[in-house]
Image: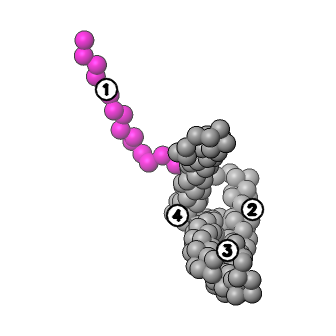
Amino acid sequence: MEITESHLEPTAEPQIILTDEAQYYLQKAGQWAYFLGIIGFIVTGFIVIAALFAGAVFSAMAKLNPMTPYPANMGVYMTFFYMLIAAFNFFFSLYIYQFGNRIKNAILYNNTQEVTVALGKLKSFFKLWGIATIVVIAVYILAFIGLIIAGINAASVMRGGTQL
């Protein structure tokens, strides 16, 4: 028995017509996205400033108290970590800002192509959010496994066994 697939070719390009209410919602969403993007850029700036001072803070702590549990070069790692957070925050802010800016203009000027570009920026924002979520979940799983291994190791040492 042969199965044949029939492919229907669309006769005309499908169109979505946005009602006035839908356009209003998109415009309001764009205003909030624009605001959140600007706030995100400001927060990114604060994170970068904190990253630049992290090295100096850890060095000063090591000089003031040589018995501090943090080595002087810990600031380099903290600077890297904060810069990584700033980079992620920048791209989140950029995508949401671009969506907000473009969707506001698209609704204002009734420009379908600009709506498409704006929704592409929104897709990029959610794609980045999804990737970040997967990474965080993976880190949580690895940390949980590490804690289980450390617990088993500690229990083994307490019973007089050897470390793993």
Specify the amino acid type for callout 3.
Answer: Tyr
* Circle 3 residues within 10 Å: few <14, some 14–19, many ≥20: some
Q: How far apart are marks 4 and 1 (CA)?
A: 34 Å
Q: Which of marks 3 and 1 is nearer the N terminus?
A: 1
Per the image, is 57 magenta?
no
- Left or right, residue 63 beside residue 149: right
Q: Can residue 163 be seen in this view?
A: yes
Magenta residues? Answer: 1-15
Specify the amino acid type for callout 4.
Answer: Val
Q: Do the residues labelled 2 and 1 touch (CB within 8 Å)?
A: no
Specify the amino acid type for callout 2.
Answer: Lys
Residue name at image x 74 percent, y 83 percent? 65
Q: Distance between the residues labelled 4 and 3?
A: 48 Å
- Marking on residue 117: 4
Specify the amino acid type for callout 1.
Answer: Glu
Q: Distance between the residues labelled 3 and 1?
A: 66 Å
Q: Do the residues labelled 3 and 1 touch (CB within 8 Å)?
A: no
> Quadrant location of residue 62?
bottom right
Residue name at image x 52 percent, y 45 percent? 164
The location of residue 85, given as percent across then percent down, is 61, 69
Query: Does 54 appear above or below 117?
Result: below
Residue that label 2 marks? 28
Q: How far apart are marks 4 and 2 (CA)?
A: 17 Å
Residue that label 1 marks? 5
Query: Does 41 appear above or below 17?
Result: below
Residue that label 3 marks? 70
Q: Earlier in the sequence, mark 4 or mark 2?
A: 2
Q: Earlier in the sequence, mark 3 or mark 2?
A: 2
